[in-house]
């Protein structure tokens, strides 16, 4: 069993019940899925770039990403409808908890000038969005695999009904939120 899943079942559920006064275990918020997206605008001119990044993202997440395609044609960017321009991975279960563990304990501390993540990046419904500027912060990416530095978008979906519950849940998982006084 993943370390964070075990932590959730043994400790976090009890802490959330005492903090918010839940009477039933099923009321306690949990993380349902994590979505990792990467946009590669240069894939329009270099089709092999998407193949290389697909291998890198598969190493980072533990599963093969799907290609996202352009929904509209944009002449200014020489983009046509149906062109593959990005990659997306949806993780659930054990892989999700493994990725979350590596994200919080390994990747985020390796970010340059890291002072915590923004506490206001919630969507109002208990979901959190996080942007990482360089995909190279993950230890699975070797220097031989680097084809450039690309940013990742990580969306964490929870069953929390509001942002306060979701923030407390993510704090218990070890997310390093910035303190209120910093930007």
Image (cartoon, rainbow, N blue to C red):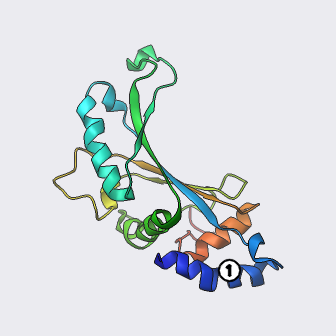
Q: Is residue 131 left or right of residue 22?
A: left
> Residue 53: where, in percent of width, then height?
30, 44
Tell me: residue 112, above or below residue 27.
above
Residue located 54% across and 75% down the image: 5
Tell me: residue 108, above or below residue 153.
below
> Residue 24: where, in percent of width, then height?
80, 77
- The foreground one among 139 and 5 is 5
Residue located 45% across and 63% down the image: 95
Secondary element under disc 1, as helix, strand or loop, is: helix
Residue located 35% across and 67% down the image: 110
> Residue 12: where, in percent of width, then height?
63, 80
Q: Is residue 10 left or right of residue 48?
A: right
Tell me: residue 139, above or below residue 76.
below
Residue at the outermost top position: 75
Instruction: State which quarter of the image contains the C terminus.
Output: bottom right
> Residue 28: where, in percent of width, then height?
73, 72
- The foreground one among 67 and 179 is 67
Alpha-carbon neighbours of circle 1 within 10 Å: few (<14), some, or many (≥20)? many
For residue 9, what is the image quadrant?
Answer: bottom right
Q: Is residue 162 left or right of residue 67?
A: right
Tell me: residue 76, above or below residue 173.
above
Residue located 47% across and 79% down the image: 3
Residue that numbered label 1 is attached to? 13
């Amino acid at each position: 069993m993943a370390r964070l899943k075990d932590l959730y079942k043994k400790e976090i559920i009890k802490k959330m019940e005492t903090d918010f006064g839940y009477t039933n275990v099923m009321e306690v918020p949990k993380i349902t899925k994590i979505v990792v997206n990467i946009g590669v605008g240069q894939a329009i001119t270099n089709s092999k770039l998407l193949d290389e990044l697909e291998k890198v993202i598969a190493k980072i997440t533990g599963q093969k990403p799907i290609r996202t395609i352009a929904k509209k044609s944009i002449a200014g960017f020489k983009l046509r409808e149906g062109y593959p321009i990005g990659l997306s991975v949806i993780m659930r279960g054990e892989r999700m908890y493994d990725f979350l563990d590596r994200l919080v304990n390994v990747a985020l501390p390796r970010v340059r000038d890291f002072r915590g993540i923004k506490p206001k990046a919630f969507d109002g419904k208990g979901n959190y969005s996080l942007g990482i500027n360089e995909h190279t912060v993950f230890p699975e990416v070797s220097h031989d695999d680097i084809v450039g530095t690309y940013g990742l978008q990580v969306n964490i979906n929870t069953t929390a009904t509001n942002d306060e519950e979701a923030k407390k849940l993510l704090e218990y998982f070890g997310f390093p939120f910035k303190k209120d006084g910093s930007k």
